[in-house]
Image (cartoon, helix red, strand yellow):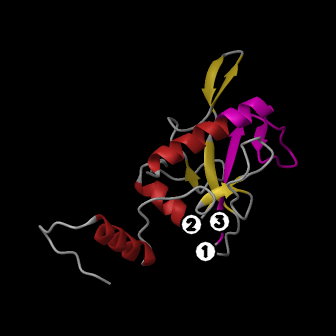
């Protein structure tokens, strides 16, 4: 591994090498759709947000997003391991106005530290992904929410 020299000019190739070295020891400088997050357990990037597939995140992507201020700093609610900040969360229009849909990430397997996280949304009696007791969100609401979250992550991941 190269050592960083202070006050020295680096070429683009040298900077890429340094970033690669940092990433190899667990310090991500960017996250990629289809590799660090995507649809389904294998984090596919070839699928459009339709509301039928769940969005998954690697633990490294979660750490990266935590460093970018994507999550609230307080403890989780509604069973979320990480609460997504309200300014990044989707909204729903109802008869009493527009409300924020509580959105967060849940660990797929609590016993496996390398297990991915998945996106979860819950509002009144609707949830995504659906559980046995909840109703499902209308598809346009889910798609709009997923698009908002994906575009925010894309902007933060640069």
Q: Is residue 106 magenta?
A: no
Q: Are marks 2 and 1 in contact (CB under 8 Å)?
A: yes
Crowd tier of the residue under label 3, counting other residues whose Cα lies within 10 Å: few below 14, some 14–19, many 20 or above: many
Q: Residue at x 75, y 30 (%)?
A: 140
- At which x and y percent is residue 68? 41, 52
Relative placement, left or right, of 12 versus 118 is left
Is residue 12 placed above or below 127 in the rendered structure? below
Relative placement, left or right, of 29 versus 104 is left
- Of 136 and 41, nearer the camera is 41
- At which x and y percent is residue 127? 76, 42
Q: Of marks 2 and 3, which one's residue comes earlier in the chain?
A: 2
Q: Can you tell which mark lies on residue 59?
A: 2
| Quadrant in the picture for residue 16 | bottom left
- At which x and y percent is residue 88? 53, 38
Q: Which residues are magenta?
A: 115-144
Q: Residue at x 52, y 42 (%)?
A: 152
Instruction: Inspect this view and state whether residue 44 appears.
Output: yes
Mark 2 to mark 1 CA distance (whole Å): 8 Å
Would you name the residue on which mark 1 appears? Answer: 113
Q: Are marks 2 and 3 in contact (CB under 8 Å)?
A: yes
Would you name the residue on which mark 3 appears? Answer: 116
Label 2: state its secondary structure.
Answer: helix
């Amino acid at each position: 591994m190269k050592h960083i020299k202070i006050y020295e000019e680096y070429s683009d190739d040298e900077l890429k090498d340094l970033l690669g070295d940092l990433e190899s020891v667990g310090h991500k400088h960017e996250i990629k759709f289809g590799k660090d997050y995507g649809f389904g357990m294998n984090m596919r990037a070839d699928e459009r947000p339709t509301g039928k597939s769940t969005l998954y995140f690697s633990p490294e992507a979660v750490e990266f997003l935590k460093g970018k201020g994507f999550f609230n700093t307080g403890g989780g609610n509604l069973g979320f391991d990480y609460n997504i900040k309200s300014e990044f969360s989707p909204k729903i229009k109802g008869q009493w106005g527009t409300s924020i849909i509580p959105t967060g990430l849940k660990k797929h397997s609590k016993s496996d530290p390398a297990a991915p996280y998945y996106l979860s949304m819950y509002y009144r009696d609707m949830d995504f992904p659906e559980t046995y007791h909840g109703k499902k969100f209308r598809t346009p609401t889910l798609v709009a929410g997923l698009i908002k979250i994906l575009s925010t992550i894309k902007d933060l991941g640069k």
